[in-house]
Each structure stands twice: as structure tokens, then as C-alpha cells.
Image: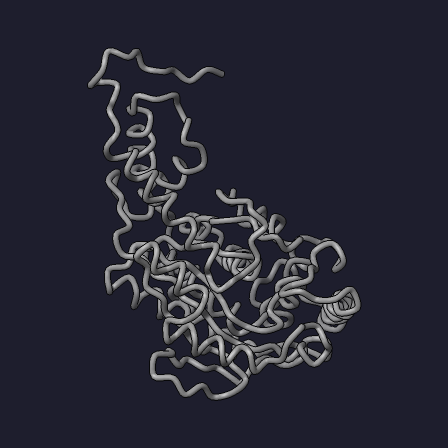
Amino acid sequence: MERIRRIVSADKSAYGAAKRKWDSIAKPLGSFGVLEEHICRIAAVQGTDSPDIPKRCAVIMCGDHGVCEEGVTQCGMEVTAECAADIACGRSNVNAVAKAYGADVLAVDVGIASDVKCSRLLHRKVSYGTRNMTKGPAMTREEAEKAITAGLDIAGQLKSEGNRLIVAGEMGIGNTTSASAIASVLTGLPPEKVTGRGAGLSTEGLIRKREAVRRAIEVNSPDPSDGFDVLCKVGGLEIAAMTGLFLGGAYYRVMTVIDGVISSAAAALAVLIEPKCREYMLASHCSGEPAGKGLLDIVRQRAVIDAGLRLGEGTGGLLLIPLLDGALSLYNNARRFDDTTIERYVELK
């Protein structure tokens, strides 16, 4: 965990230089909205007013949840193993989206409940799923730290391979239950306000899911001020690994992208553990799950896309890439006031 303690803030001078560069473009000030802010933040992470993201990768952390015993999912945990293999072999949802935007995809087993025989799946298994959080902590502190370390290491590996943008995605049957519990603890809202239908629960299933979240919080009493405590008690191994990925992005100075509600839960925990890591994150979309916006508020992130997305696997995160590419093209190639006779805009307050 020494790397977490050594995280520093992004480069504020590079942010300011990028902001001035935006303001030099012959257009109304701030007229490209949140995307201007996103490019400035990438500049701050890269330490230059000429940022770029030519190499990008979606990392899909995979793990299972013992809370599935409570009937909170539409399908069984065996689906996690099958989907992880599909992602690793390039035939899942995320692969189809990634191909359109020139992004690589890396699937990682940090906690699948079975052994997946797939040479393309990165094996970093900490344990065979988490324990049932309605009966006690989902994992030990040691297990959580191992999963976080896996995420830190992968961020470092991807940075060394030239990646400038990492999308944090997941695959794990039952993980919206865990994310809902995390959201309830961190936001202080009751389970019924932050727990949704996930992959498509019936009304009866939703009732069971909300009750499981309520019991997990009641049994474990997670401390909302302690990210590690919340993670160990009601988290998941893939959520811990994504938490490590976000922290690793900050340590290795590479921009990370938050995907949906599970990714947002991991981002919120990362910020709770080390607040400076929020400077190395971008929110792609606001999840269709009810906990989505509240978790992004904790991270102090404004999503660019609000389309009711809830597919997971990093798919929503990848949709941010063409918007960033478009914004960078405008940033780098548009005419400047100095090249025209147009009078510069001034900020009116």
C-alpha cells in the first residue's frame, strides 16, 4: 500500500495552460462544455498542454459474490466464468464496442468462483468469490489488499505499454447488490433508494435484493469514513481490483475512466482512500441504476453521457472515447482568435 501514500496531485500548471489554449479558439468561451474540462484534466495528468490518448485499453475485472445465495440475481454465478472467457477471447459486448474505437480489452480474474481455462484471461485470483455479506464481511482485509494491489500493478503495466487512457469495467453476477450496499453506506440513503433491478430482476427479486443490502449493512456496520472497511464488509473482489486500478491511475499518472454503477462504487472507494486520485478520473456516463448519480457526486464527477446505460463490462466507458477524440481534434486543429479578425470573447459574470 506504499504506492497509495505516494500519490500526488495532477499538474495544475498544465491544466491552466490547456484552459488558456481552449480559450484561444475562435468560439464562445466554454462552449464545448464538460469536454473542455475533460481535456484540461487529461493535460494535467500528462503534464502537458498537448495531451493525447492514442493508445487506450478497457480493463474488465471479474469476480463472484457470495450474496448470490440470497436470490438477488436473475442467473447463476456460472455466467461470470462464461462471460469472462468470452471477453478474454474477444467475443463479448465490450469487445464489439472497443473495436469501433481502437481500444484494447484486458479481462482479469480476481475472484471468479471457478477456474476458467482460458489462456487469454489474466489470472490474478485472490479467492473463489466473496463470502455472503448478509452473514458477515465479504472478504478479509488481506484479500481486499491483494485485489487492490492487482489493480495497482495492472495500471502500472498498462502505462509502461504506452496506454494513456484506461477504462475500468467489470463482470460479476451479483455485483450490483454489492455496489448498492456501498452506495447506501457512502450516501447515507436507505437501500430502497439506491438498489435497482440490475440485469433485470422481477419485483420479488428486487425486494429480496433490497433486503439483502439492508441485512448486510446491519450485520457488518461498515464505517462510511473508512474505504477499506466498507470494501471488506460489503464489497467485491472485482470492485477492490477496480479501486486499485483507479488508485494506480493516480500513482502512475494515467487517466482512468469510470464506467457504470459498479465502476462508480469502486471510484468512490478509491477517493475515500486517497482523495487526490479523483484528479485522475473521468466520468463517462451516469448509470441507469439508482445509485449512479449519488456515487458520481461523491467522486465530484459530472458524466458526459446520460442515456440510461446499464450494460456494464466497460461498454459505457468506451463510449466516452469518440467524444474525447472529437474534443481533442477541435482543441488541436480549430482556428485561433489570433488567426482571424474575430474579437476575442470575454468571460461575463
Colouring: one colour
Which residue is depicted at the point 56% across and 47% down?
A: 307
Which residue is depicted at the point 75% across and 73% down?
A: 219
Which residue is depicted at the point 39% across and 21% down?
A: 28
Which residue is depicted at the point 28% across and 12% down?
A: 342
Residue 150 can be seen, yes or no: no
**21 relative position to 310: left or right:** left
Residue 324 can be seen, yes or no: yes
Image coordinates for residue 18, horizontal then vertical, percent: 30, 34
Q: How many marks?
A: 0
Q: Residue furthest left?
A: 339
Look at the picture and state if 292 lies above or below 179: above
Q: Look at the image and tell me in which quarter the N terminus lies.
A: bottom left
Return the residue nearer the eye: 19 or 290. Answer: 290
Return the residue nearer the eye: 301 or 336. Answer: 336
**216 relative position to 122: left or right:** right
Return the residue nearer the eye: 100 or 114. Answer: 100
Image coordinates for residue 27, horizontal then vertical, percent: 34, 22
Q: Quadrant of residue 257?
A: bottom left
Image coordinates for residue 296, horizontal then vertical, percent: 56, 49
Q: Quadrant of residue 164?
A: bottom left
Image coordinates for residue 349, horizontal then vertical, percent: 49, 16
**79 relative position to 84: left or right:** right
